[in-house]
Image (cartoon, rainbow, N blue to C red):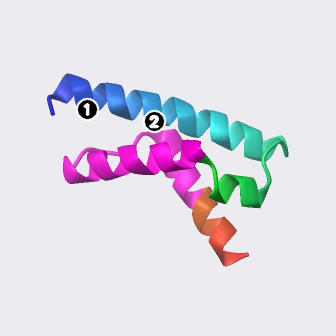
């Protein structure tokens, strides 16, 4: 995967992570819906690609990962 393709994947996943975080923070998405979200599955797939490429995770993806970790500790 080229750098420009990787950047595009990271950008799109980060935008999706931002939308997901916003929905969680506004209470439009429950914890259960968050865990079962197809958007989350897409973000995780992108995260795996970024990790394999040793690329840095964008900020919203990092925030979403932190939120997910919080959810599993509750």
Q: Which residue is drawn at the image coordinates 83% and 40% (left, top)? A: 26
| Disc 2/disc 1 C-alpha distance (Å) | 11 Å
Marker disc for residue 64: none
Q: Secondary structure at mark 1?
A: helix
Taking the view exactly as shown, the residue that stands out farthest to the right is 27
Which residue is rendered at x = 78% and y = 47% of the image? 29
Name the quarter where the C terminus is drawn. bottom right
Q: Is residue 18 left or right of residue 7?
A: right
**Mark 2–mark 1 contact, CB under 8 Å?**
no
Residue 61 included in the magenta stretch of the image:
yes
Q: Position of residue 4 (x, y in %)?
A: 22, 23
Q: Position of residue 64 (x, y in %)?
A: 57, 50
Name the one closer to the observer, 13 or 55: 13
Where is 46 relative to 36, above or below?
above
Residue at the image point whose x is 65% and y is 67% from the top: 70
**Circle 2 residues within 10 Å: few <14, some 14–19, many ≥20:** many
Q: Residue at x 41, y 28 (%)?
A: 11
Residue 13 marker: 2
Q: Which residue is mark 1?
A: 6
Q: Which residues are magenta?
A: 38-66
Q: Residue 66: give x, y in percent of width and height.
A: 57, 59
Q: Is residue 6 magenta?
A: no
């Amino acid at each position: 995967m080229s750098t420009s393709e990787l950047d595009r994947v990271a950008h799109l996943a980060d935008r999706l992570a931002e939308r997901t975080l916003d929905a969680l923070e506004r209470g439009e998405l429950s914890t259960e819906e968050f865990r079962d979200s197809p958007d989350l599955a897409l973000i995780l797939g992108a995260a795996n690609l970024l990790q394999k490429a040793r690329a840095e995770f964008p900020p919203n993806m990092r925030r979403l990962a932190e939120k997910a970790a919080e959810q599993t500790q509750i």
